[in-house]
Image (spheres, rainbow, N blue to C red):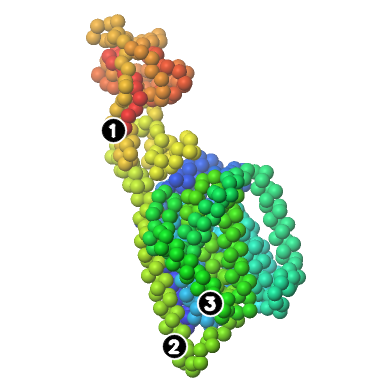
């Protein structure tokens, strides 16, 4: 399997991939859904309800939930752990693919080239660099290929039948436990059985495949129906746009600008915005030509199942596209340009090529001696492999560092460093920048949610003399108030508003509405606990001797704040010398 020159070449492909992807993963960081998922996993205990009955962004993925829970509780914000998991998942997937290719194309040098396509393609890069997307892609591909491997073993009479069938069914179950998109594993398995049905030809391949593995298909159909029924009980399916014009626009973007350039090591030139990769027109044109040439060559000189193999790839792409149109078409053309939704097509392309070449003559009609043809074939495949590597390098350069989330890393690093410099600081809770977490998720995009798992245990919105705001780069900065309203002058000269054990209302010059920050200046000769309230909100702080200040955050209660009430818990008196209330403003 791994011996000889071809095994060494395959191992070299894997090593290049591991080193290359490890470097890129080390330079990436968390983004968007990563924070949302980690916060949700951090705030709850590990339970059956959390794993199976709690939809996460509309999905029910127990293995993903378990992974997020373990990561955030073992090493919160530990990107090296996440990067290692992603690289290991990809490596395992590529290793399984090599075993599949070896069974389909034993002794054929072309299997090394096909291995390189999955290992190096930039199509899976963006999905890999984003943690929440990587745990959708790589388990899906791993279990899809694992199912294909053991179904192929069963078809070839290798191993015990019950073991092969158990692994095939287990692959479908585990794939679905990671992500709903793994529902495509069953059609891939059916296509595998059809493509391996060499005892029949034409449409008789389908009936032969159904007859040979009928207990397996019955079991998988029952499994999928049960899964869909239970899944529908827990969550709801997102709707899409039914406009035909929008569907056509998305479809062209998905196939022409996303799938085909990615399969052929692109994109080599593109405009990147958010998660969309808008491939340049000349790249689309070259990709279409390469796709036509490849399909033509496979149909001309491929093996007995070549037509079915090409049809399999087309059908898989259409199935992937149908899932996008059914659930995401409301986003318009941009969703067709998102590599996340096309990344899994790369393994279908490799499988289709392998099945098409299976049983094909290696000489392709050329009248050369065996040694001469072997040298020629090795040279041609070497050139193609080198060209793919160069193309993948250019395609990767287009996507990096746009998808490495460097701003996220800098934002979190700045926040943690400033907090470590003075752990007594209290932070005004606010929305993080939209580039880090979109405000569409509501309170889950607030600082207090995003940074909840941090080992520094940051404190938000509590009364403090060291209150800070987080600027757009993640640094902690002094609080600034926009449009602040002062208190009315106090009745006692050189004291302002004296506060004792009876409640004292300190009126503002005018009322002010919104989520507010208050700055209170006071002095006292005895430490005392002071209760402060505004509307239904209340809190307590320790008034220290001498002149001091305290900051506190007033929540938005939908009405104007006209006064702040204070009361000393004890016999002391605290003089309120100043008070201003306003909207927090970032510099």
Whether 375 is drawn above or below 432: the answer is below
Considering only order in the chain, which callout, 2 or 1, is on the residue closer to the N terminus?
2
Element assignment for label 3: helix
Closer to the camera in the image, 559 or 285: 285
* The C terminus, quarter of image: top left
Element assignment for label 1: loop
Q: Are dots 1 and 2 in contact, CB under 8 Å?
A: no
Q: Which numbered tag is attached to residue 219? A: none
Q: Residue furthest bottom?
A: 369
Q: Can residue 324 be seen in this snapshot?
A: yes
Left or right of 316? Residue 202 is right
Q: Nearer the viewer, mark 1 or mark 3?
A: 3
Q: CA gap, disc 1 to disc 2?
A: 67 Å
Considering only order in the chain, which callout, 3 or 1, is on the residue closer to the N terminus?
3
**Which residue appears at 40% of the width and 10% of the height?**
503
Q: CA gap, disc 2 to disc 3?
A: 21 Å
Considering only order in the chain, which callout, 3 or 2, is on the residue closer to the N terminus?
3
- The residue that mark 2 highlights is 375
- The residue that mark 3 highlights is 297
Could you tell me residue 108's position as x and y percent? 52, 81
- What is the crowding at mark 1: few (fewer than 14 residues within 10 Å), some, or many (at least 20)? few
Among the 4 quarters of the image, the one containing residue 480? top left
Element assignment for label 2: helix
């Amino acid at each position: 399997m791994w011996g000889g020159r071809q095994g060494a070449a395959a191992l070299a492909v894997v090593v290049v991939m591991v080193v290359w992807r490890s470097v890129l993963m080390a330079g990436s960081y968390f983004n968007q859904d990563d924070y949302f998922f980690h916060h949700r996993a951090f705030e709850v205990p590990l339970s059956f309800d959390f794993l199976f009955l709690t939809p996460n962004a509309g999905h029910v993925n127990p293995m993903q939930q378990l992974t997020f829970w373990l990561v955030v509780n073992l090493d919160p914000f530990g990107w090296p752990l996440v990067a290692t998991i992603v690289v290991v998942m990809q490596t395992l997937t590529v290793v399984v693919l090599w075993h599949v290719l070896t069974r389909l194309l034993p002794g054929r040098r072309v299997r090394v080239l096909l291995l390189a396509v999955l290992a190096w393609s930039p199509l899976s890069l963006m999905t890999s660099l984003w943690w929440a997307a990587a745990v959708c892609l790589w388990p899906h591909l791993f279990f899809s290929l694992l199912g294909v491997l053991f179904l192929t073993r069963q078809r070839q009479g290798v191993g015990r039948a019950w073991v092969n069938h158990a692994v095939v069914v287990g692959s479908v179950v585990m794939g679905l436990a990671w992500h709903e998109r793994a529902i495509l594993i069953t059609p891939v398995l059916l296509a595998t059985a059809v493509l391996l049905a060499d005892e029949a030809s034409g449409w008789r391949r389908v009936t032969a495949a159904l007859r040979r593995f009928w207990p397996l298909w019955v079991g998988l159909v029952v499994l999928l129906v049960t899964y869909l029924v239970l899944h529908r009980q827990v969550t709801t399916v997102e709707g899409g746009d039914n406009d035909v014009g929008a569907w056509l626009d998305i479809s062209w973007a998905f196939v022409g600008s996303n799938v085909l350039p990615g399969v052929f090591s692109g994109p080599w030139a593109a405009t990147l915005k958010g998660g969309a990769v808008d491939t340049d027109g000349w790249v689309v044109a070259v990709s279409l030509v390469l796709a036509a040439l490849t399909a033509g060559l496979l149909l001309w000189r491929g093996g007995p199942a070549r037509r079915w193999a090409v049809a399999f790839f087309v059908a898989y792409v259409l199935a992937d596209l149908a899932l996008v149109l059914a659930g995401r078409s409301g986003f318009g053309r941009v969703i067709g340009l998102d590599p996340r939704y096309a990344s899994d097509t790369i393994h279908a392309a490799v499988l289709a090529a392998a099945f098409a070449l299976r049983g094909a003559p290696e000489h392709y009609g050329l009248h050369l001696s065996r040694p001469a043809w072997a040298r020629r074939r090795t040279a041609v495949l070497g050139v193609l492999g080198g060209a793919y590597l160069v193309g993948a390098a250019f395609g990767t350069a287009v996507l990096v560092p746009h998808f490495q989330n460097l701003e996220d890393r800098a934002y979190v690093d700045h926040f943690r460093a400033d907090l470590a410099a003075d752990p007594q600081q209290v932070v005004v809770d606010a929305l993080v920048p939209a580039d880090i977490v979109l405000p569409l998720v509501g309170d889950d995009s607030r600082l207090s949610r995003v940074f909840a798992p941090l080992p520094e245990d940051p404190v938000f919105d509590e009364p403090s003399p060291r209150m800070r705001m987080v600027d757009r780069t993640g640094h902690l900065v002094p609080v600034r108030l926009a449009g602040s309203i002062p208190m009315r002058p106090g009745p006692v000269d050189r004291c302002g508003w004296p506060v004792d054990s009876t409640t004292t209302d300190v009126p503002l010059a005018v009322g002010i509405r919104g989520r507010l920050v208050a700055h209170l200046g006071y002095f006292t000769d005895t430490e005392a606990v002071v209760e402060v309230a505004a509307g239904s909100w209340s809190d307590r702080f320790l008034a220290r001797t001498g002149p001091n200040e305290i900051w506190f955050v007033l929540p938005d209660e939908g009405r104007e704040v006209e006064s702040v009430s204070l009361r000393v818990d004890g016999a002391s008196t605290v003089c309120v010398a100043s008070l201003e209330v306003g909207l927090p403003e970032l510099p």
